Amino acid sequence: MSGSGKTTLAFHVIENFIKNDKPFLVFDWKKSFRPLMERDHEIACFTVGNDGVSNNFRTNINRPPAGIPPKEWINTLCDLLTESFSASYGVHKVLIETLNESFKEWGIYEGTENYPTWHQIKWKLEQKFQKSRGRESGWVESALRIATVLTFGSYGKVVNYKGNNSIAVEDLLNKKIIFEMNSLGNLEKKFFCEFVLTYIYKLKKAESVASEKFNYAILVDE
């Protein structure tokens, strides 16, 4: 519960990682961990979804980790979205079908690396909503709400980036990272955390690398 000392305990844990020069990743929901940067200048801090501070971590969430087939990643991503947004099986079905259609149209299954973003997915959902009827219309409308959150404002820049300066999750694994998330809503925070954690898990699984090789700590402070 609040006030029980979770953040204080986390500070002591991370200070030991700093002392032993070990990489870590902190999901900081309340902007509590920035003082650690005074202890170690190697710490990189990304204020997710706030262009006024340091919204420099940007990626395309539709791009799978290396070694993960696109169709497997579609399933994983749709599982994450329906869990984070408490959506129904029908919404899950609409999301999978729409992503699959987009991947086919963009040539992903033929080997291109030009992955669509959720701006394209949102457009396809808008087209489907105009044609849908009955129960399916409700599913598409709910899927469209998810797509709207994923494309809105500065947060949309974080998860839909296609430029040359994107930062892959892989680039973080040997570094000391703080993700400040106080600028985000709870749905955005939950999905972002689960996305990064799942991405790391899938990456490690695909590479079949023993976990001790990473020597990596992940901390979520809500």
Image: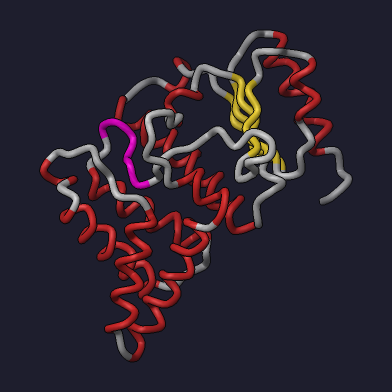
Number of residue marks:
0
104 drawn magenta: no
Q: Which residue appears at 29% of the width and 31% of the height?
A: 66
Q: Which residue appears at 23% of the width and 57% of the height?
A: 102
Q: Is residue 75 left or right of residue 150?
A: left
Q: Residue 209 in the image: state x and y as whole percent.
A: 36, 21
Along the line of sight, which residue is nearer the eye, 181 or 49? Answer: 49
The image quarter in which residue 169 lies: top left
Q: Residue furthest right?
A: 3
Along the line of sight, which residue is nearer the eye, 45 or 64? Answer: 45
Query: Which color scheme did the rendering employ for the protein?
Result: secondary structure
Q: Residue 11 in the image: state x and y as whole percent.
A: 78, 26
Q: Which residue appears at 34% of the width and 65% of the height?
A: 123
| Helix, strand or loop for the magenta stretch, by majority | loop
Along the line of sight, which residue is nearer the eye, 196 or 124? Answer: 124
Q: Is residue 192 left or right of residue 138?
A: right
The image quarter in which residue 175 lies: top right
The image quarter in which residue 23 lies: top right
Q: Residue 113 in the image: state x and y as whole percent.
A: 23, 37
Q: Residue furthest bottom?
A: 134
Q: Residue furthest left?
A: 110
Magenta residues (range): 62-67
Q: Which residue appears at 29% of the width and 62% of the height?
A: 96
Q: Is residue 42 left or right of residue 164?
A: right
